[in-house]
Each structure stands twice: as structure tokens, then as C-alpha cells.
Image: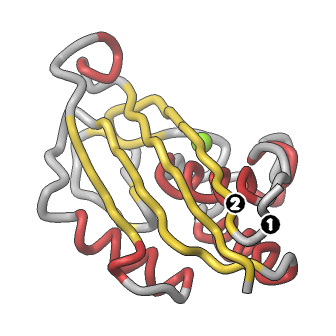
Amino acid sequence: MNEKYRIGNSIDIHPLVIGAPLYIGGVLIPSKKGSISHSDGDALMHAVVESILGALNKGDLGMSFPDTDEKTTGISSTFFLNEVKKILNDEGYKINNIDIMIVLEEPKLGKYKKLVCENLSSLLGIKINQINIKAGTNEKIASIGNNDSYLVWCTTLIEKI
Ligand code: MG
């Protein structure tokens, strides 16, 4: 196995409900509907964290951060990113690049992608051009298309330090 580069991916989905906040990549996005989960419902952050864990051969998000843990109830998902950043460093790896796909019907994310990218790059200590964020809709199909949920895919390549 090539240990110089390792790749991980993840997909995360959360329900959207009226009145809840919508955090995407740690950025509060103005929206009628927000995301709910055990933590703050930040599917982008969860997908990024889990893709890094995958690249490190460390199972899934729930193995490291169980959703039964009262310490993480309602917590900002930035906590998980900071924790996984430490694990990445302890294992002797750094991030090469991250590619993210958000599928959300409303609101349109065009004007927020740069903010999300800047926040992630600052939290991870990597350059903006190491993170690519794409956003699209589900063409009004099914639960995502009805704006009752949203989904994030993420692929991360890590490199031995
Ligand atoms: Mg999640």
C-alpha cells in the first residue's frame, strides 16, 4: 500500500426544519429552514471530518464521536474538525486537497461558498486553493428537492508529512 498519499470520502444528510439554524462549514447561512442533528447539524463539517477519518483508516464519524455522547449534544461541529486535525497531525499526515459537493435546494449558496472555504482553510491551516466547494440543487426531486433535507459529499486526499 502507498502510504505517501491516502484518500477518504464521506456523505452526510440532515433534515431541514423551519426555525432551526443552518450551519454549513461553520458559517451561519441565512435561511428559512435549518438543519437538526445531535450536534449543530453541519453536514459539510461532518462529511469533511469523516472523509479525513476515512483517509486515516479510522472508521466512521460515529466511531470517534458517538451521537449518544452528551458532551457533544448541540455542540458546534468545529469541535470535531479541530479534534480530527489533531489526529491527522499525530498520524503524521497533512491535507493535500478537499473536494466538496453540497446538494441543497434553498437557499442558493453561490455567495456563501467563498466564506465557507475561507473558514475551513483557517480552521485547518491550509490554503484556500486546497479546498474546492461545489453546490447544486436536487432539481426539486424527493426530500432534498422539497427542501426537507440537504446532503454533502466530500473527498479528501492526505499526504505524509
Ligand atoms: Mg451528520
In terms of depth relative to the viewer, which is nearer, 17 or 62? 62
134 sits to left or right of 67: left
**Image x and y of residue 12, in percent:** 54, 37
Find numbered disc 1 in the image and state the secondary structure of the residue it sits on.
loop
**Quarter where residue 99 is shown:** bottom left
**Image x and y of residue 137, in percent:** 20, 32
**How has the structure been colored for display?**
secondary structure
**Quadrant for ligand 1?**
top right
Q: Quadrant of the N terminus?
A: bottom right
The residue to which callout 2 is attached is 6
**Quarter where residue 37 is shown:** top right
CB atoms of marks 1 and 2 within 8 Å? yes
Q: Amino acid at mark 2?
A: Arg
Q: Quadrant of the C terminus?
A: bottom right
Above/below status of 156 relative to 135: below
User: 10 Å neighbourhood of mark 1: few (<14), some, or many (≥20)?
Assistant: few
In terms of depth relative to the viewer, which is nearer, 106 or 101? 101
Q: Amino acid at mark 1?
A: Glu
In terms of depth relative to the viewer, which is nearer, 61 or 55? 55
Real-space CA distance between mark 1 and mark 2, rounded to the nearest whole angstrom: 6 Å
Above/below status of 117 relative to 89: above
Q: Which mark is residue 3?
A: 1
**Image x and y of residue 145, in percent:** 24, 20
In terms of depth relative to the viewer, which is nearer, 42 or 32? 42
Above/below status of 19 relative to 58: above
